Image: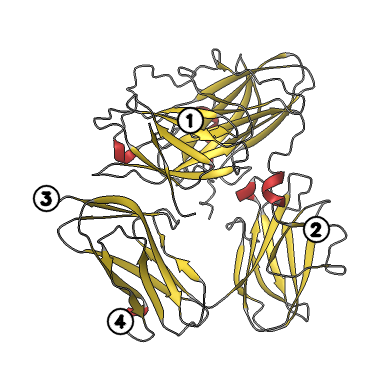
Amino acid sequence: MILATNGLTSLTQRRSGALYWLAFLILATLRILDPTAPALAQSPDTARLMPAGGMRGTTVTIELPGKWEKWPVSIWSSSSQVQWLATETAGKVSVIIAPDAKPGAHFVRFYNESVASPLLRFIVGGFPEGLEVEPNDDVRQPQTIDIPASPTLPAITINGALQKSGDVDHYGIRLAKDQLLTVSIDGHRNLKSPMDASLQLLDTKGNLYGQNLDALGLDPRLQFKCPRDDVYVVRVFAFPETPDSTIGYAGGDKFLYRLHATIGDYDEAAESFSENATSIAEPSDRTNPTAVAGPSSFFGAMDNARDEDVLSIETTAAGHWKIKARALELGSSMDAVLEVLDPAGKSIAKQGDSGEIRDPVLSNQMQAAGKYMIAVRDLHGRFGPSFRYRIDLENELPHVKGSITNDIVTGTADKPIEVEVALERTFGFADDATISVVGLPAGYTCEPVVSKMKEDSEKKVKLSIVPNAPCSVPLSIEIQHAGQSEKQSITATNSTTPMLWLQVTPPK
Protein backbone atom coordinates (compact mmCIF):
# COMPACT_ATOMS: atom_id res chain seq x y z
CA MET A 1 0.00 0.00 0.00
CA ILE A 2 1.07 3.60 -0.58
CA LEU A 3 0.24 6.25 1.98
CA ALA A 4 -0.62 9.71 0.74
CA THR A 5 1.86 12.50 1.36
CA ASN A 6 0.72 15.61 3.20
CA GLY A 7 0.79 18.97 1.44
CA LEU A 8 0.64 22.69 2.24
CA THR A 9 -1.99 23.48 4.16
CA SER A 10 -22.38 34.88 -8.26
CA LEU A 11 -24.69 32.87 -8.15
CA THR A 12 -25.52 32.26 -11.78
CA GLN A 13 -28.57 34.01 -13.00
CA ARG A 14 -31.90 32.64 -11.80
CA ARG A 15 -34.00 31.06 -14.47
CA SER A 16 -37.20 32.78 -15.42
CA GLY A 17 -39.80 32.77 -18.14
CA ALA A 18 -42.84 30.72 -18.98
CA LEU A 19 -40.95 28.26 -21.21
CA TYR A 20 -38.55 27.23 -18.45
CA TRP A 21 -41.23 26.66 -15.84
CA LEU A 22 -43.50 24.83 -18.26
CA ALA A 23 -40.62 22.51 -19.13
CA PHE A 24 -39.82 22.09 -15.42
CA LEU A 25 -43.36 21.02 -14.51
CA ILE A 26 -43.57 18.60 -17.43
CA LEU A 27 -40.18 17.02 -16.81
CA ALA A 28 -40.73 16.73 -13.06
CA THR A 29 -43.51 14.20 -13.62
CA LEU A 30 -41.60 11.98 -16.06
CA ARG A 31 -39.65 8.81 -15.31
CA ILE A 32 -36.53 8.85 -17.42
CA LEU A 33 -35.21 5.34 -17.95
CA ASP A 34 -32.06 4.25 -19.78
CA PRO A 35 -30.80 0.97 -18.36
CA THR A 36 -28.56 0.39 -21.39
CA ALA A 37 -26.41 3.49 -20.80
CA PRO A 38 -22.68 2.62 -20.71
CA ALA A 39 -20.69 2.81 -17.49
CA LEU A 40 -18.52 5.85 -16.91
CA ALA A 41 -15.00 5.55 -18.21
CA GLN A 42 -12.13 7.18 -16.38
CA SER A 43 -8.41 7.70 -16.92
CA PRO A 44 -5.79 8.51 -14.26
CA ASP A 45 -5.76 12.24 -15.08
CA THR A 46 -9.55 12.57 -14.84
CA ALA A 47 -10.14 10.60 -11.65
CA ARG A 48 -13.53 10.86 -9.93
CA LEU A 49 -14.29 10.01 -6.32
CA MET A 50 -17.26 7.84 -5.47
CA PRO A 51 -18.13 8.13 -2.66
CA ALA A 52 -17.21 11.81 -2.60
CA GLY A 53 -16.98 11.90 1.18
CA GLY A 54 -17.10 10.00 4.42
CA MET A 55 -17.95 10.13 8.11
CA ARG A 56 -15.41 11.13 10.75
CA GLY A 57 -13.77 8.15 12.46
CA THR A 58 -14.41 5.69 9.62
CA THR A 59 -12.50 4.09 6.75
CA VAL A 60 -13.98 4.50 3.29
CA THR A 61 -13.25 2.39 0.22
CA ILE A 62 -13.27 4.15 -3.14
CA GLU A 63 -13.20 2.31 -6.46
CA LEU A 64 -11.89 4.62 -9.17
CA PRO A 65 -13.73 3.83 -12.42
CA GLY A 66 -11.84 2.93 -15.55
CA LYS A 67 -8.82 0.85 -16.41
CA TRP A 68 -5.65 1.58 -14.45
CA GLU A 69 -2.75 0.18 -16.44
CA LYS A 70 -0.17 1.43 -13.93
CA TRP A 71 -0.81 0.60 -10.28
CA PRO A 72 -0.31 1.46 -7.50
CA VAL A 73 -0.84 5.16 -8.01
CA SER A 74 0.79 7.79 -5.81
CA ILE A 75 -1.48 10.02 -3.73
CA TRP A 76 -1.05 13.53 -2.33
CA SER A 77 -3.39 14.74 0.43
CA SER A 78 -3.91 18.25 1.76
CA SER A 79 -4.55 17.06 5.31
CA SER A 80 -3.02 14.56 7.73
CA GLN A 81 -6.55 14.08 9.14
CA VAL A 82 -7.55 12.24 5.95
CA GLN A 83 -5.06 9.53 4.92
CA TRP A 84 -5.20 7.82 1.54
CA LEU A 85 -3.92 4.32 0.80
CA ALA A 86 -3.56 2.70 -2.62
CA THR A 87 -4.52 -0.94 -2.08
CA GLU A 88 -3.16 -3.96 -3.93
CA THR A 89 -6.25 -3.98 -6.15
CA ALA A 90 -5.93 -1.68 -9.15
CA GLY A 91 -8.33 1.24 -8.95
CA LYS A 92 -9.21 0.73 -5.28
CA VAL A 93 -8.12 3.12 -2.53
CA SER A 94 -8.86 3.30 1.19
CA VAL A 95 -9.48 6.57 3.00
CA ILE A 96 -8.86 6.69 6.75
CA ILE A 97 -10.71 9.63 8.33
CA ALA A 98 -9.60 10.71 11.79
CA PRO A 99 -12.29 10.97 14.49
CA ASP A 100 -11.42 14.65 14.95
CA ALA A 101 -11.13 15.46 11.24
CA LYS A 102 -12.41 18.91 10.37
CA PRO A 103 -15.81 18.77 8.65
CA GLY A 104 -15.94 20.04 5.09
CA ALA A 105 -13.73 19.81 2.03
CA HIS A 106 -10.33 18.15 2.04
CA PHE A 107 -8.23 17.83 -1.12
CA VAL A 108 -6.50 14.93 -2.85
CA ARG A 109 -4.52 14.40 -6.04
CA PHE A 110 -3.53 11.13 -7.76
CA TYR A 111 -0.34 11.06 -9.79
CA ASN A 112 2.40 9.00 -11.37
CA GLU A 113 5.56 9.81 -13.31
CA SER A 114 3.66 11.00 -16.38
CA VAL A 115 0.36 12.53 -15.30
CA ALA A 116 -1.48 14.06 -12.33
CA SER A 117 -5.19 14.21 -11.66
CA PRO A 118 -7.10 17.43 -11.10
CA LEU A 119 -7.39 18.60 -7.50
CA LEU A 120 -10.31 16.57 -6.13
CA ARG A 121 -12.59 17.40 -3.21
CA PHE A 122 -13.43 14.87 -0.50
CA ILE A 123 -16.06 15.97 2.03
CA VAL A 124 -15.82 14.93 5.67
CA GLY A 125 -19.18 14.71 7.43
CA GLY A 126 -20.69 13.65 10.73
CA PHE A 127 -23.44 11.25 9.60
CA PRO A 128 -23.33 7.55 8.68
CA GLU A 129 -22.89 7.23 4.91
CA GLY A 130 -24.15 5.11 2.04
CA LEU A 131 -23.95 4.87 -1.75
CA GLU A 132 -26.45 5.31 -4.52
CA VAL A 133 -27.38 2.01 -6.18
CA GLU A 134 -28.64 1.99 -9.76
CA PRO A 135 -31.22 1.50 -11.16
CA ASN A 136 -33.24 3.96 -9.11
CA ASP A 137 -34.94 5.92 -11.90
CA ASP A 138 -38.51 4.78 -11.19
CA VAL A 139 -40.57 6.45 -8.44
CA ARG A 140 -42.40 3.15 -7.97
CA GLN A 141 -39.15 1.30 -7.30
CA PRO A 142 -36.88 3.69 -5.42
CA GLN A 143 -33.66 2.76 -3.71
CA THR A 144 -34.57 2.08 -0.10
CA ILE A 145 -32.77 4.19 2.50
CA ASP A 146 -32.68 2.93 6.07
CA ILE A 147 -31.85 5.86 8.32
CA PRO A 148 -29.86 4.43 11.27
CA ALA A 149 -31.44 4.74 14.70
CA SER A 150 -29.64 7.17 16.97
CA PRO A 151 -30.22 8.45 20.51
CA THR A 152 -29.41 11.96 19.30
CA LEU A 153 -30.30 12.20 15.60
CA PRO A 154 -31.35 9.59 13.03
CA ALA A 155 -29.44 10.71 9.93
CA ILE A 156 -27.65 9.45 6.84
CA THR A 157 -25.69 10.82 3.89
CA ILE A 158 -26.00 9.16 0.48
CA ASN A 159 -23.26 9.70 -2.10
CA GLY A 160 -24.74 9.76 -5.58
CA ALA A 161 -24.22 10.90 -9.15
CA LEU A 162 -26.45 12.00 -12.00
CA GLN A 163 -24.45 9.99 -14.45
CA LYS A 164 -25.94 11.08 -17.75
CA SER A 165 -28.29 13.61 -19.30
CA GLY A 166 -31.83 12.87 -18.20
CA ASP A 167 -30.79 10.92 -15.10
CA VAL A 168 -33.20 11.04 -12.15
CA ASP A 169 -32.53 9.34 -8.80
CA HIS A 170 -35.22 8.16 -6.35
CA TYR A 171 -34.78 7.20 -2.69
CA GLY A 172 -37.52 5.66 -0.56
CA ILE A 173 -37.69 6.40 3.17
CA ARG A 174 -40.25 4.84 5.52
CA LEU A 175 -41.57 7.45 7.95
CA ALA A 176 -44.08 7.54 10.77
CA LYS A 177 -46.87 10.06 11.15
CA ASP A 178 -45.71 13.49 12.43
CA GLN A 179 -42.02 12.73 11.93
CA LEU A 180 -40.07 15.70 10.55
CA LEU A 181 -37.89 14.84 7.57
CA THR A 182 -35.18 17.23 6.36
CA VAL A 183 -33.38 16.48 3.09
CA SER A 184 -30.72 18.57 1.37
CA ILE A 185 -28.26 18.26 -1.47
CA ASP A 186 -24.61 19.21 -1.30
CA GLY A 187 -23.47 19.36 -4.91
CA HIS A 188 -22.56 22.86 -5.99
CA ARG A 189 -21.57 24.31 -2.60
CA ASN A 190 -18.77 22.03 -1.43
CA LEU A 191 -18.23 19.53 -4.22
CA LYS A 192 -18.31 22.28 -6.88
CA SER A 193 -20.31 20.02 -9.17
CA PRO A 194 -21.51 21.96 -12.26
CA MET A 195 -25.16 21.36 -11.37
CA ASP A 196 -28.26 23.24 -10.26
CA ALA A 197 -29.93 20.43 -8.33
CA SER A 198 -33.61 20.05 -7.48
CA LEU A 199 -35.42 18.02 -4.81
CA GLN A 200 -38.96 16.67 -4.80
CA LEU A 201 -40.83 14.64 -2.20
CA LEU A 202 -43.48 12.20 -3.43
CA ASP A 203 -45.24 9.02 -2.48
CA THR A 204 -44.75 5.81 -4.48
CA LYS A 205 -47.80 6.68 -6.62
CA GLY A 206 -46.11 9.85 -7.80
CA ASN A 207 -48.17 12.33 -5.75
CA LEU A 208 -46.07 15.44 -5.12
CA TYR A 209 -45.81 16.74 -1.54
CA GLY A 210 -43.09 19.35 -1.90
CA GLN A 211 -40.19 20.59 -4.00
CA ASN A 212 -37.25 22.97 -3.79
CA LEU A 213 -34.60 24.26 -6.18
CA ASP A 214 -32.32 26.87 -4.65
CA ALA A 215 -32.63 27.08 -0.86
CA LEU A 216 -28.84 26.86 -0.42
CA GLY A 217 -27.43 28.77 -3.37
CA LEU A 218 -27.84 26.35 -6.27
CA ASP A 219 -28.42 23.45 -3.85
CA PRO A 220 -31.92 22.54 -2.60
CA ARG A 221 -33.22 21.84 0.90
CA LEU A 222 -36.65 20.52 1.84
CA GLN A 223 -38.48 19.94 5.13
CA PHE A 224 -41.59 17.78 5.44
CA LYS A 225 -43.84 16.73 8.32
CA CYS A 226 -45.32 13.33 7.53
CA PRO A 227 -49.15 13.23 7.48
CA ARG A 228 -49.27 9.42 7.90
CA ASP A 229 -47.16 6.28 8.16
CA ASP A 230 -45.89 5.58 4.65
CA VAL A 231 -42.93 5.26 2.32
CA TYR A 232 -41.96 8.67 0.93
CA VAL A 233 -39.75 9.13 -2.10
CA VAL A 234 -37.01 11.73 -2.47
CA ARG A 235 -36.40 12.57 -6.12
CA VAL A 236 -33.11 14.18 -7.24
CA PHE A 237 -32.46 15.71 -10.65
CA ALA A 238 -30.54 18.70 -11.96
CA PHE A 239 -30.14 21.39 -14.57
CA PRO A 240 -26.75 22.67 -15.70
CA GLU A 241 -25.02 25.18 -13.46
CA THR A 242 -24.90 27.66 -16.33
CA PRO A 243 -28.32 27.92 -18.03
CA ASP A 244 -28.40 26.96 -21.69
CA SER A 245 -31.02 26.31 -24.36
CA THR A 246 -31.42 22.62 -23.51
CA ILE A 247 -34.85 21.64 -22.21
CA GLY A 248 -34.08 18.58 -20.15
CA TYR A 249 -32.31 17.27 -17.11
CA ALA A 250 -28.53 17.46 -17.02
CA GLY A 251 -25.97 14.89 -15.97
CA GLY A 252 -22.44 13.68 -16.52
CA ASP A 253 -19.38 12.27 -14.79
CA LYS A 254 -18.89 15.49 -12.76
CA PHE A 255 -22.49 15.67 -11.47
CA LEU A 256 -21.67 14.28 -8.02
CA TYR A 257 -23.83 15.02 -4.99
CA ARG A 258 -24.29 14.17 -1.34
CA LEU A 259 -27.87 13.74 -0.15
CA HIS A 260 -28.35 14.44 3.58
CA ALA A 261 -31.48 13.03 5.23
CA THR A 262 -32.36 13.56 8.90
CA ILE A 263 -35.40 12.77 11.04
CA GLY A 264 -36.05 15.31 13.76
CA ASP A 265 -35.24 18.94 14.39
CA TYR A 266 -31.55 19.34 13.64
CA ASP A 267 -29.37 22.31 12.82
CA GLU A 268 -26.77 20.75 10.54
CA ALA A 269 -25.00 24.04 9.75
CA ALA A 270 -24.58 25.50 13.26
CA GLU A 271 -20.93 24.53 13.65
CA SER A 272 -19.87 26.25 10.41
CA PHE A 273 -21.37 29.57 11.53
CA SER A 274 -20.11 29.61 15.10
CA GLU A 275 -16.56 28.28 14.64
CA ASN A 276 -14.11 30.87 16.02
CA ALA A 277 -16.88 33.50 15.98
CA THR A 278 -18.77 35.56 18.57
CA SER A 279 -22.56 35.41 18.89
CA ILE A 280 -24.57 38.57 18.22
CA ALA A 281 -27.32 38.97 20.81
CA GLU A 282 -30.48 41.07 20.53
CA PRO A 283 -31.18 43.92 20.59
CA SER A 284 -28.87 44.78 17.74
CA ASP A 285 -30.21 47.54 15.50
CA ARG A 286 -29.25 51.00 14.28
CA THR A 287 -30.33 52.55 17.56
CA ASN A 288 -28.63 49.91 19.72
CA PRO A 289 -25.82 48.38 17.64
CA THR A 290 -23.61 45.65 19.02
CA ALA A 291 -20.09 46.99 19.63
CA VAL A 292 -17.40 44.76 18.13
CA ALA A 293 -13.69 44.92 17.44
CA GLY A 294 -11.88 43.62 14.40
CA PRO A 295 -10.45 41.78 12.67
CA SER A 296 -12.81 39.04 13.90
CA SER A 297 -15.94 37.03 13.08
CA PHE A 298 -19.53 37.17 14.34
CA PHE A 299 -22.68 35.14 13.81
CA GLY A 300 -26.40 35.58 14.36
CA ALA A 301 -29.84 35.00 12.84
CA MET A 302 -32.89 36.96 11.79
CA ASP A 303 -35.24 36.75 14.79
CA ASN A 304 -38.35 38.48 13.45
CA ALA A 305 -39.89 39.81 10.25
CA ARG A 306 -37.80 42.57 8.62
CA ASP A 307 -35.11 42.07 11.26
CA GLU A 308 -31.77 43.78 10.77
CA ASP A 309 -28.70 43.16 12.91
CA VAL A 310 -26.23 46.02 13.26
CA LEU A 311 -22.61 45.98 14.42
CA SER A 312 -20.68 49.03 15.57
CA ILE A 313 -16.92 49.18 15.08
CA GLU A 314 -14.46 52.01 15.75
CA THR A 315 -11.26 52.07 13.70
CA THR A 316 -8.29 53.98 15.08
CA ALA A 317 -6.23 54.39 11.91
CA ALA A 318 -6.62 54.60 8.16
CA GLY A 319 -7.02 51.19 6.58
CA HIS A 320 -8.78 48.97 4.07
CA TRP A 321 -11.41 46.62 5.48
CA LYS A 322 -13.07 43.63 3.83
CA ILE A 323 -16.52 42.75 5.19
CA LYS A 324 -17.92 39.39 4.12
CA ALA A 325 -21.42 38.06 4.83
CA ARG A 326 -21.54 34.25 4.68
CA ALA A 327 -24.94 32.61 4.58
CA LEU A 328 -25.75 30.41 1.58
CA GLU A 329 -22.16 29.22 1.45
CA LEU A 330 -22.55 27.71 4.92
CA GLY A 331 -26.02 26.25 4.48
CA SER A 332 -28.30 29.15 5.45
CA SER A 333 -31.53 29.99 3.64
CA MET A 334 -30.78 33.70 3.94
CA ASP A 335 -30.29 36.06 0.98
CA ALA A 336 -28.01 38.46 2.83
CA VAL A 337 -27.92 42.20 2.23
CA LEU A 338 -24.82 43.90 3.61
CA GLU A 339 -24.51 47.64 4.24
CA VAL A 340 -21.83 49.93 5.71
CA LEU A 341 -22.69 53.31 7.29
CA ASP A 342 -20.19 56.07 8.02
CA PRO A 343 -19.81 57.90 11.37
CA ALA A 344 -22.65 60.26 10.36
CA GLY A 345 -24.99 57.33 9.71
CA LYS A 346 -24.86 57.73 5.93
CA SER A 347 -24.83 54.60 3.78
CA ILE A 348 -21.49 54.38 1.97
CA ALA A 349 -21.67 50.84 0.56
CA LYS A 350 -24.35 48.21 0.02
CA GLN A 351 -24.47 44.85 -1.71
CA GLY A 352 -27.04 42.08 -2.05
CA ASP A 353 -30.15 44.24 -2.41
CA SER A 354 -30.55 43.43 -6.12
CA GLY A 355 -30.82 39.71 -5.46
CA GLU A 356 -28.14 39.00 -8.06
CA ILE A 357 -25.22 38.74 -5.63
CA ARG A 358 -25.48 36.14 -2.90
CA ASP A 359 -23.24 36.19 0.16
CA PRO A 360 -22.08 39.78 -0.47
CA VAL A 361 -18.52 40.97 0.07
CA LEU A 362 -17.60 44.65 0.50
CA SER A 363 -13.91 45.38 0.05
CA ASN A 364 -11.85 48.53 0.64
CA GLN A 365 -14.23 49.85 3.31
CA MET A 366 -13.83 52.08 6.40
CA GLN A 367 -10.70 53.72 5.02
CA ALA A 368 -10.57 56.64 7.46
CA ALA A 369 -10.42 56.31 11.24
CA GLY A 370 -13.83 56.62 12.86
CA LYS A 371 -16.93 54.85 14.14
CA TYR A 372 -18.86 52.80 11.57
CA MET A 373 -21.93 50.57 11.53
CA ILE A 374 -22.31 47.31 9.59
CA ALA A 375 -25.90 46.18 8.96
CA VAL A 376 -27.07 42.79 7.70
CA ARG A 377 -30.60 41.64 6.82
CA ASP A 378 -32.47 39.17 4.63
CA LEU A 379 -33.43 40.52 1.21
CA HIS A 380 -37.04 39.37 1.61
CA GLY A 381 -37.43 40.11 5.32
CA ARG A 382 -37.66 36.43 6.25
CA PHE A 383 -36.68 35.16 9.68
CA GLY A 384 -36.18 32.07 11.80
CA PRO A 385 -33.31 29.78 12.88
CA SER A 386 -32.50 28.82 9.29
CA PHE A 387 -31.96 32.48 8.31
CA ARG A 388 -28.55 32.80 9.88
CA TYR A 389 -25.39 34.58 8.88
CA ARG A 390 -21.73 34.94 9.67
CA ILE A 391 -19.82 38.23 9.32
CA ASP A 392 -16.05 38.11 8.80
CA LEU A 393 -14.11 41.36 9.26
CA GLU A 394 -10.63 41.56 7.79
CA ASN A 395 -8.22 44.50 7.78
CA GLU A 396 -6.48 44.22 4.43
CA LEU A 397 -2.96 45.45 3.87
CA PRO A 398 -2.00 46.89 0.49
CA HIS A 399 -0.43 43.98 -1.37
CA VAL A 400 0.10 42.24 -4.70
CA LYS A 401 -2.17 39.34 -5.62
CA GLY A 402 -0.89 36.73 -8.04
CA SER A 403 -2.37 33.90 -10.07
CA ILE A 404 -1.46 31.40 -12.76
CA THR A 405 -3.80 29.91 -15.34
CA ASN A 406 -3.63 26.23 -14.39
CA ASP A 407 -2.92 24.55 -11.07
CA ILE A 408 -0.81 21.89 -12.83
CA VAL A 409 2.43 23.21 -14.31
CA THR A 410 3.86 20.83 -16.91
CA GLY A 411 7.12 20.49 -18.80
CA THR A 412 9.90 18.14 -19.80
CA ALA A 413 13.18 17.55 -17.99
CA ASP A 414 15.39 18.74 -20.86
CA LYS A 415 14.42 22.44 -20.94
CA PRO A 416 13.34 25.31 -18.68
CA ILE A 417 9.66 25.58 -17.78
CA GLU A 418 8.23 29.08 -17.99
CA VAL A 419 5.44 30.04 -15.61
CA GLU A 420 3.61 33.31 -16.24
CA VAL A 421 2.21 34.93 -13.12
CA ALA A 422 -0.51 37.58 -13.46
CA LEU A 423 -0.27 40.32 -10.80
CA GLU A 424 -2.76 42.77 -9.34
CA ARG A 425 -1.75 45.58 -6.97
CA THR A 426 -4.37 46.44 -4.36
CA PHE A 427 -5.03 49.63 -2.40
CA GLY A 428 -2.28 51.56 -4.11
CA PHE A 429 0.60 49.25 -3.23
CA ALA A 430 3.55 50.75 -5.11
CA ASP A 431 6.61 49.02 -3.63
CA ASP A 432 8.56 46.12 -5.07
CA ALA A 433 7.30 42.56 -4.70
CA THR A 434 9.45 39.44 -5.09
CA ILE A 435 7.90 36.32 -6.64
CA SER A 436 9.65 33.03 -5.82
CA VAL A 437 9.17 29.30 -6.26
CA VAL A 438 9.76 27.40 -3.00
CA GLY A 439 10.20 23.73 -2.18
CA LEU A 440 11.58 22.58 -5.54
CA PRO A 441 13.14 19.11 -5.81
CA ALA A 442 16.88 18.82 -5.28
CA GLY A 443 18.84 19.98 -8.31
CA TYR A 444 16.03 22.22 -9.60
CA THR A 445 16.57 25.97 -9.74
CA CYS A 446 14.36 29.01 -10.24
CA GLU A 447 15.57 32.56 -9.83
CA PRO A 448 13.17 34.94 -8.01
CA VAL A 449 11.68 37.76 -10.08
CA VAL A 450 10.95 41.27 -8.78
CA SER A 451 7.78 43.13 -9.79
CA LYS A 452 8.20 46.90 -10.02
CA MET A 453 5.70 49.69 -10.51
CA LYS A 454 5.54 51.35 -13.95
CA GLU A 455 7.67 48.65 -15.53
CA ASP A 456 6.77 45.60 -17.61
CA SER A 457 6.84 43.51 -14.44
CA GLU A 458 4.08 45.56 -12.75
CA LYS A 459 1.23 43.36 -14.00
CA LYS A 460 2.94 40.10 -14.90
CA VAL A 461 6.23 38.27 -14.51
CA LYS A 462 7.70 35.06 -15.88
CA LEU A 463 9.43 32.50 -13.71
CA SER A 464 11.83 30.02 -15.29
CA ILE A 465 12.07 26.65 -13.55
CA VAL A 466 15.18 24.73 -14.62
CA PRO A 467 14.69 20.98 -14.02
CA ASN A 468 17.32 18.26 -13.88
CA ALA A 469 15.10 15.16 -13.82
CA PRO A 470 11.45 14.10 -14.13
CA CYS A 471 9.26 14.73 -11.10
CA SER A 472 5.67 14.93 -9.91
CA VAL A 473 5.48 17.07 -6.76
CA PRO A 474 3.50 19.83 -5.02
CA LEU A 475 4.48 23.34 -6.13
CA SER A 476 4.37 26.58 -4.15
CA ILE A 477 4.85 30.10 -5.51
CA GLU A 478 5.01 32.97 -3.02
CA ILE A 479 5.01 36.76 -3.09
CA GLN A 480 7.17 38.68 -0.62
CA HIS A 481 6.14 42.33 -0.29
CA ALA A 482 8.71 45.01 0.45
CA GLY A 483 8.28 46.21 4.04
CA GLN A 484 6.04 43.29 5.06
CA SER A 485 7.04 40.10 6.83
CA GLU A 486 4.09 37.97 5.68
CA LYS A 487 4.09 36.19 2.35
CA GLN A 488 1.17 35.44 0.04
CA SER A 489 0.66 32.27 -1.97
CA ILE A 490 -0.11 32.32 -5.67
CA THR A 491 -3.41 30.69 -6.63
CA ALA A 492 -4.64 29.11 -9.86
CA THR A 493 -7.62 30.55 -11.70
CA ASN A 494 -8.97 27.12 -12.63
CA SER A 495 -9.14 25.94 -9.00
CA THR A 496 -8.84 29.17 -6.93
CA THR A 497 -6.51 27.40 -4.47
CA PRO A 498 -2.76 27.68 -3.79
CA MET A 499 -2.46 23.87 -4.05
CA LEU A 500 -0.34 23.79 -7.20
CA TRP A 501 1.42 20.87 -8.84
CA LEU A 502 4.59 20.44 -10.93
CA GLN A 503 4.60 17.61 -13.47
CA VAL A 504 7.92 17.15 -15.31
CA THR A 505 8.19 14.21 -17.71
CA PRO A 506 11.21 12.69 -19.45
CA PRO A 507 12.40 14.34 -22.67
CA LYS A 508 10.30 13.44 -25.69
Tell me where residue 498 sits by quadrant.
Answer: bottom left
Task: Tell me, yes or no, whether the two marked residues, 2 and 4, touch with CB atoms within 8 Å.
Answer: no
Label 2 – label 4 distance at C-alpha = 48 Å
Q: Secondary structure at mark 4?
A: helix
Ranked by sequence position, the earlier of labels 1 and 3 is 1
Which residue is identified by label 1? Answer: 51
Q: Residues within 10 Å of mark 1 (few under 14, many from 20)?
A: many
Q: Secondary structure at mark 3?
A: loop
Label 2 – label 3 distance at C-alpha = 61 Å
Q: Position of residue 131 (x, y in %)?
A: 51, 24
The amino acid type, in three-letter code, at marker 3 is: Lys
Label 1 – label 4 distance at C-alpha = 47 Å
Ranked by sequence position, the earlier of labels 1 and 2 is 1
Label 1 – label 3 distance at C-alpha = 37 Å
Residue 349 in the image: above or below residue 325: below
Discs 1/3, front: 3
Q: Secondary structure at mark 2?
A: loop
Residue 65 placement, left or right of 6: left
Colour scheme employed for the rendering of this structure: secondary structure
Which residue is identified by label 4? Answer: 456
Which residue is identified by label 2? Answer: 280
Ranked by sequence position, the earlier of labels 2 and 3 is 2
